[in-house]
Amino acid sequence: MTVYLETKSGFLHDVLHGNLTEKLIDAFQKRFGRSVAPSEIRSWDNSLDEMYKVIGTHLLPENSGIAIEFNIPQTAKRVDFIVTGLDADGRPSAVIIELKQWDQVERTSKDAIVRTFLNGTKREVSHPSYQAWSYAALLEDFNTVVQNDHVRLSPCAYLHNCRQPAGILDAFYAAHLGRAPAFLKRDAPRLQTFITDRVRTGDSGDLMARIRTAENRPAKSIADALSGMLAGKREFVMIDDQKLVFETALSMAKSAARGQKQVLIVEGGPGTGKSVVAINLLASLLSAGIASRYVTKNAAPRAVFEARLSGSMARSRIGTLFTGSGSFTESSPDEYGALIVDEAHRLNEKSGLYGNLGENQVRELIRSARFSVFFIDEDQRVTLRDIGTKAQIHQWAHAEGALVEELSLESQFRCGGSDGYLAWLDHILQIRPTANLSLSDCGYPFTVCANPRELHDRIIALNQADQRARVVAGYCWPWLSKNDPEAMDIAFPEHGYGARWNLASDGSLWIEKPEAVTEVGCIHTCQGLETDYIGVIIGPDLMVRDGKVTTHPERRAKSDATIKGFKTLAKNDPVAAAQTGDTIIRNTYRTLMTRGRRGCFIWSSDPETQEYFARLASPTPCQ
């Protein structure tokens, strides 16, 4: 969908006569079914006046195509401004322009991320050159007109209010600037030259008209690249019931492409290989020509899988296949061939930064694809906003007219391959009673350390082999080091121990960083991922009194988003609040204690709780 499609002369006429913004507002409301935010209207007024000056050059043909707010199919992304025509060789050509009103930009230490003022506060956002390039990459990878007609795509960014090159043009971003140059306020003549060098003959908007109605199919290059990367990664090899789920999902996706919308629910506990199947399925669906995406609410698994699958194709290009669960509020029905939803228990009802967009993520995902598969473990719901349940999926699948099948993954490939350990953990956390009262037959090393320093020292020692050991904790301590790098967030002076929460600069890749072993992660940076050894510090949100496990949401750190809204819920419905908070905390520690493939170490800050775990854990030497 394109909100506005005209020729150069039509665009100049609409700006000159003051009609453009009204046309954009009317078209936007018809397309998206909602009003336009005042900030976006101001952005159109300011930025499109600047483009009027750039486009007005006599060197650009009058019948060049002008597209504004082009919604890239199968995404919620919209391209600000596109100029189309033919280049000097007669090849179809499109100049993709990302428009920004920013006047100041700061460099960060994160790839393709800058810092600027937005909505009255300083925020980290994508570098506009990366944004523009990523839009071009999406079109190259999935639009058949771009692929078949060998369309020349030329992305760039125009910061028409920015005078200072420092930050935005920093050498740190050279790779992104090389693929998509950034033009500042002083560079309007250079931007004119950039456009007119690539559009020599007009096309009356024909190219964009064909692009927006084209079939969306993955390019062979991206399908081959992803398949090749998987072939060399042992952690993505499927065995046992993983293969059954994979083949069933592949068959259902191909069947759905020919007719009936279908949904597959795959239930599996920690370490049963849900993500292994999901990534293999993504590669195979793309190879079959089915436009697909891997979807997860958690940013950490997306970032880690992108990093691990980097190879002959740039990681940022592979990254276009991975998306968050809130990206489908504006998707058209059956816009995708398949959506692979990992960690489906983490889905939310609403989307957006302020939780004010969309109706229900489960419904939006099912509506957006011919086939959707949900990998789920309801015992890993760890926030008040998590709504992902099998019941929800069945409800919305029925509402969307989809057939539903259920499968399960049973084989345990984490925690030493021991189903007994998981059952024992459920028993001692008093999540549910089981027959596994002892660890003696589980064969999985579970060690209660005498103090936090001993726990962290043992993890550091085990990490030396292959960087696969980490320390995590319940979110019971404030993140002081975020603003004060010298502060110790988790400190126990009586044990000579102090450590910081994971660095903000590492973002979702914390678990992959070698230096991360000296820090402490939380549920947000490890859920959906695994290590060889995990060390867990239990905070005062989970305590044992007289043999009974009790939970205390009020002892979580104020910055912990997992229980945001708990106080309001407690006022309105104290019983429901207590039950929900209790489930979240128990599930959080169950999730943390099942991240290690080869062993788990724990220590509790509460003496009675420490004694409880020490009494129930039989000592098993590390393998």
Image (cartoon, rainbow, N blue to C red):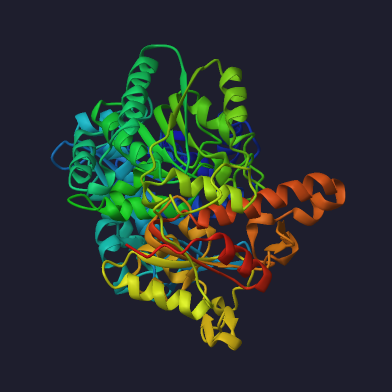
**Residue 135: percent from left, percent from top:** 36, 45
**Label total for image:** 0
**Residue 71: percent from left, percent from top:** 45, 37
Q: Which of these two is toward me, 425 or 151?
A: 425
Left or right of residue 173: residue 26: right
Which residue lies most toward the left here?
89
Task: Answer yes or no: is residue 58 visible.
Answer: no
**Residue 591: percent from left, percent from top:** 52, 52
Q: Quarter of the image containing the N terminus?
A: top left
Q: Is residue 454 above or below residue 287?
A: below
Task: Answer yes or no: is residue 531 visible.
Answer: yes
**Residue 255: percent from left, percent from top:** 36, 15
Image quadrant in which you'd find residue 54? bottom left
Q: Which residue is drawn at 31% across and 24% down?
A: 247
Q: In this view, does 360 lie above or below 254?
A: below
Q: Which of these two is toward me, 585 or 321?
A: 585
Q: Residue at x 42, y 78 (%)?
A: 457
Q: Quarter of the image containing the C terminus?
A: bottom left
Q: Which of these two is toward me, 290 or 167?
A: 290
Q: In this view, does 96 lie above or below 116?
A: above
Q: Which residue is drawn at 67% across and 44% down?
A: 356
Image quadrant in which you'd find residue 217? top left
